[in-house]
Amino acid sequence: MDDIRDIAVAVTCYNNEDEVLEFAKHLSNQSLIDKIQLLVTCNACINFERFQVKLLSVLPTALAFNPGKNLGYLHGCLYGVKKSESNYAWVMISNTDIEFTDNDYFEKLLQSAADDNDIWCIGSDIVLKANGAHQNPFLSQRPSKRKSSLWKTVYSSYPLFRLYFKLYALKHKEEANADIKSSFIYATHGSCFLLKDECVNKIIEENPGIFMYGEELLVAEIIKENNKKCYLNIDTCVLHNENQVTGRIGNRKKQGWFKQSINYLFENHLS
């Protein structure tokens, strides 16, 4: 396939075809849409062929792929990138339950790295529609060994896992009006982030043992290990209607995925 796009927007579909189609329609309003390639990996679809027809009617340049199994979030998105057989300068890994607040969102985002080739990841101000809480910065600084060890302990126990996330939700509700600034950070929130092609290639080469969750830490560690940067640009904003898909997944399954991710990260990056 010819290299006709500068930016790939890689998403997954998991029995949420209507949401993905709405996302494609929303994306089509971007001023740089002629430079954007939407890639959809169907981790689960009721009828892939029917979905593919509907997707092309909304955004004729979009590409949909059916791996025949659930690859998870990051691997699912990267599957689309690999199957497209194109080279992209930037790849956005994104949920489909988001809205860009401006039609020139990608222009503003790319300006962040216009004069700095060391920027490998760009995040936006991500605002939860439910309560106005800001999800970025995900982590301003690299977590201490004590904190990452705490995660490892918490994610290994279902009761501790549930308690931790109840407390986490309360904390972020209190921080709904947090004062944030554009800056270099350690990690951006995983619901929507832009990666430079070199960073994407590093992730693909590693083929990380992560199914769901922990993507933020993985990307942050790869950036750190290569002496590159992650930038938060709050002049760009995304509205996040959280948990449209993951909200239907049982807590015990989530806990298992968190445990798998943190164990992999400890063995390969955080230890």
Image (cartoon, rainbow, N blue to C red):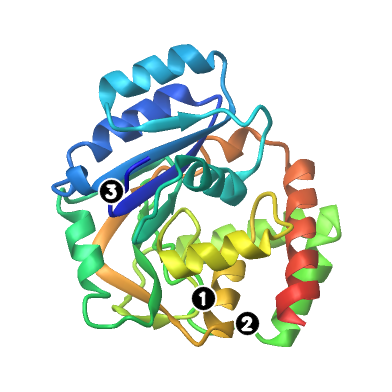
- Is residue 242 in sight in this rendering? yes
Residue 55: image location, x then y, percent: 36, 23
Indicate which disc residue 5 carries.
Answer: 3
Q: Is residue 125 above or below residue 180?
A: above
Q: Earlier in the sequence, mark 3 or mark 2?
A: 3
Within 10 Å of disc 3 (Cα), the crowding (few <14, some 14-19, many 20+) is some
Residue 235 spot, x, y in % from top left: 21, 68
For the view shown, which residue lies furthest in the front direction? 2
Q: Give me the C-alpha separation between circle 3 and circle 2.
A: 36 Å
**Residue sitting at x 44%, y 49%:** 94
Please tell me which residue is depicted at 34% across the width and 35% down the height of the picture: 23
Q: Which residue is mark 2?
A: 143
The residue tagged 1 is: 139
Whole-Å distance between the Cαs marked 2 and 1? 8 Å
Secondary structure under tag 3 reads loop
Q: Nearer the viewer, mark 3 or mark 2?
A: 3
**Pointer 2 with pointer 1, Cβ within 8 A:** yes
Say whether residue 150 is visible: no
Classify the position of the C terminus by image quarter. bottom right
- Residue type at mark 2 is Pro
Residue 97 rendering spot, x and y as whole percentages: 41, 40
- Quarter of the N terminus within the rendering: top left
- Name the side, left or right, on which 2 lies relative to 204: left
Q: Position of residue 116 (x, y in %)?
A: 29, 83
Q: What is the number of the mark on residue 44?
A: none
